Image (cartoon, grey):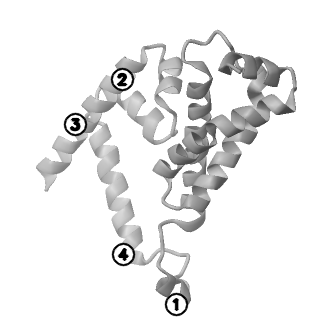
Amino acid sequence: MTERMMVEMAKAGRAEALEQIYLRNRDRIFHLALRYVRFPEDAEDIAQDTFIKAFDAISTFDLNMGSGFPAWLNQICVHCAIDHLRVRKRRWGRTTSLEALAQDPPSALPSPEQVAVGRGIRRRVRNAVGYLSPRQQAVFSLRYIEQLDIRQIAGRLGCSEGNVRAHLFRSASKLKGLFLAES
């Protein structure tokens, strides 16, 4: 059965087509997820989320899309992996050893030194961003403050994704130069 036939059958609600799609793609999706996370258990969770989201949205898949179904499935997997990493980062902050977990938990409040350092860094970044062109400031803000992806920034500013990437590269280079000059 061809990929196109399987997708058409799956869009029609045929469970055996969904099963075939899963069987044909599960290893590739698992290994793709494993590239983003270190643990096979996490990769398994991401793969499951990928197939759940894909099967929920399969009716929206365009069979005439140039990149094809595997690329669409890969894209869903990458988004699931990124979401997983964001949740893990929010929940755990950084990876912790078992010995550290056995100790008393650290205070949730930052130390006065951490507060001072954080303020100093934020002040330096705000000052340095002032040296960027207005367009670079907008791109920098949308990317690193509002956490938008390249496509969203391009859409919001009405320019190409390549233009956004160029502004991000130039602003990062300029900021790096400013910070190195201060050191």
- The residue under label 2 is 135
Rendered image: mark on residue 144: none
Split into 4 quadrants, where in the image is the N terminus? top right
Amino acid residing under circle 4: Glu
Task: Tell me the residue that label 4 is attached to.
Answer: 113
> Which residue sits at x=35%, y=26%?
165
C-alpha span from label 4 to label 3: 29 Å
- When the figure is inspected, residue 152 is found, relative to residue 8, above or below; the finding is below
- Report the quarter where the C terminus lies: bottom left
Q: Dot 1 corresponds to which residue?
A: 103
Dot 3 corresponds to which residue? 173
The percent position of residue 150, horizontal first and vertical second, equals 46, 28
Q: CA distance from mark 4 to mark 1?
A: 22 Å
Whichever of callouts 1 and 3 sits on the residue coming sooner in the sequence is 1
**Mark 1 closeness class: few <14, some 14–19, many ≥20 residues within 10 Å:** few
Type of residue at label 2? Arg
Residue 160 screen position, x and y as percent: 42, 14
| Residue 177 position within the rendered picture, expressed as x and y whole percent measured from the top left | 16, 42
Q: Are marks 2 and 1 in contact (CB under 8 Å)?
A: no
Q: Distance of mark 4 from mark 2, alpha carbons?
A: 35 Å
Q: Residues within 10 Å of mark 2 (few under 14, many from 20)?
A: some
Q: Earlier in the sequence, mark 4 or mark 2?
A: 4
